[in-house]
Amino acid sequence: MKSETGRALVAGTCSGVASTLVVHPLDTVRTRLQTASAGEFASAWHCATATIRAEGALSLYRGLAGPLAAQGAYKAVLFGVYGAAGRAVRRGRDAPLSLAETFAC
């Protein structure tokens, strides 16, 4: 594995993990709102604060392992393939990709 590919895979994994850590609490609140009985929560903010008060802040991260692994792998592949495609399109040139080449990747 070339070092550029390795860096792309690591960067993709970090990207997937970071985005999941930020978005997962919002997904948890959304899911709780969808499954709650009518009128249980007045708003998404009310749902989040009530959940934190009742169960603690870490309750917003319940079920994190699956999405964390999936998004880490998904983004690693995405970054790796994009980098490999960019290198293939450039064919040794050191210049940045043109707009058309970017869309081709």
Image (cartoon, grey):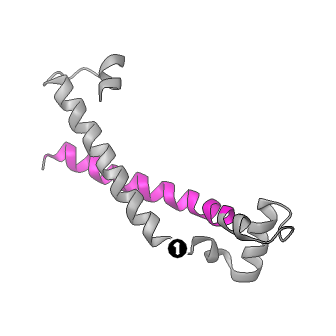
The residue positioned 78% from the left and 61% from the top of the image is 45
Would you say 71 lies left or right of 45 here? left
The residue positioned 77% from the left and 67% from the top of the image is 47
On the image, the x and y values in percent for residue 86 come to: 24, 30
Which residue is outermost to the bottom?
55
Q: Nearer the viewer, residue 51 or 37?
A: 37
**Magenta stretch: residue 90 in it?**
no
Q: Quadrant of residue 56?
A: bottom right
On the image, the x and y values in percent for residue 98 come to: 32, 17
**Region rendered in magenta:** 2-30
Q: Secondary structure at mark 1?
A: loop
For label 1, the residue is 63
Would you say 97 lies left or right of 51 here? left
Please say whether residue 98 is visible from this viewpoint.
no
The residue positioned 26% from the left and 37% from the top of the image is 83
Would you say 18 lies left or right of 57 here? left
**Magenta stretch: residue 9 in it?**
yes
Please say whether residue 92 is visible from this viewpoint.
yes
Q: Main secondary structure of the magenta part?
A: helix
Q: Quadrant of residue 79?
A: top left
On the image, the x and y values in percent for residue 7 come to: 26, 48
Count of number-bearing discs: 1
User: Is residue 5 shown above or below 102?
Assistant: below
Dot 1, how many residues are within 10 Å of its Cα: few (below 14), some (14-19), or many (20+)? Answer: few
Quadrant for the C terminus in the image: top left
Q: Amino acid at mark 1?
A: Gly
User: Is residue 63 shown above or below 55?
Assistant: above
Q: Quadrant of residue 89?
A: top left
The residue positioned 33% from the left and 58% from the top of the image is 73
Q: Nearer the viewer, residue 35 or 105?
A: 35
